[in-house]
Image (cartoon, coloured by chain):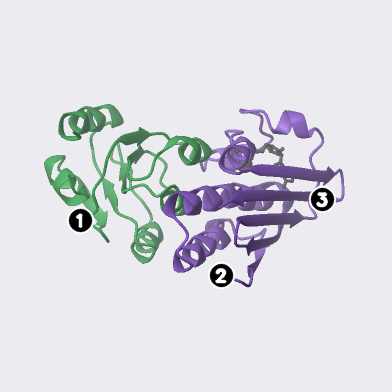
Amino acid sequence: MNEAVKLHFLVDGEDFTSAGQASVQVKKSLRQLGISPEIIRKVSIAMYEGEINMVIHAGGGEADVVIYEDRIEIDLIDHGPGIANIDLAMQEGFSTAPDNIRSLGFGAGMGLPNMKRYTDSMKIDSELGKGTRILMTVNL
Amino acid sequence: MTVHEMAKTLELTPLSVTDGEREFSGVYIGDLLSWVMGRAKSDNVWITIMSNINIVAVASLADVACIILAEGVTVDENVRTTAEAKGINLYSSEKTAYELASMLARIDV
Ligand SMILES: Nc1ncnc2c1ncn2[C@@H]1O[C@H](COP(=O)(O)OP(=O)(O)OP(=O)(O)O)[C@@H](O)[C@H]1O
Ligand SMILES: [Mg+2]
């Protein structure tokens, strides 16, 4: 693989029932590229958590996934409300998810911690009222 | 042991069986989806009472061998068809999560 493979997705903030589609597509693409199952699992879980967060907390966004020879980068950008306190948001159990979302099984406050756990690096940039950008890297 | 053999032993009701020959190992029980994403392992049997459409994506990405809906929980038809389309084994049972898990503990070697 000499050329980097680039995937781009629009994440719909309205349609909660199809949330996760981009992650499922990434999983498929990585499988076609012959990436190992452990790496596929890490990338697709980290991406799913980020994708769901954009749907639940930010009204949707965009996702770019680039597969290089030595790493996979996942770049998530939204124009939602931003995260007031990133350290707090990163703690296991912290969630601002409303009750209707909790009744679907989300809102345990484990999404961001999972993204950190399953990636080799994770950087969050967020500004209140402007939006959030999360860049994650998984080494191959 | 295959998912199909396990399902027969536990007398599960099949809702979507796309790969009954898949081997399972280990069990994860939980309803909070990010806990499942963080803690379930590949090839686990996942027992839950959560029945909305999002369980299909979670099962696919966490790469579990099958979902068992415990306590007689039912799903909408679109959940069943989505599971079929995405290649997810989905079963239901009247038994509690505890009863299912203790039966699985006896056969999962
Ligand atoms: N893209 C985002 N925009 C705005 N706020 C966010 C975003 N992502 C996360 N947050 C905030 O950070 C909190 C923690 O996120 P995290 O994913 O860990 O938990 P959760 O989404 O609430 O629950 P879970 O992921 O377990 O279903 C959220 O409740 C929300 O307040
Ligand atoms: Mg989350």
User: Chain A's shade in the image?
Assistant: purple
Query: Which mark lies nearer to you, 3 or 1?
Result: 1
Q: Which residue is mark 3?
A: A131
Q: Residue furthest bottom?
A: A3
Can you see residue B54? no
Residue B73 on image: x %, y %: 33, 42
The disc numbered 3 marks a residue on which chain? A
- Tell me: is circle 3 under 8 Å from ligand 1: yes
Residue visible at 54% across and 62% down? A26
Chain to which the residue tagged by mark 2 belongs: A
Q: Amino acid at mark 1?
A: Glu
Labelled pair 3, 2 in contact (Cβ < 8 Å): no
The residue under label 1 is B21
Give amino acid for label 3.
Answer: Gly
Density class for disc 2 (Cα within 10 Å; few <14, some 14-19, many ≥20) is: few
For disc 2, the marked residue is: A1
Report x, y in % for residue A70. Answer: 60, 57
Secondary element at image label 3:
strand
Badge 2 element: loop
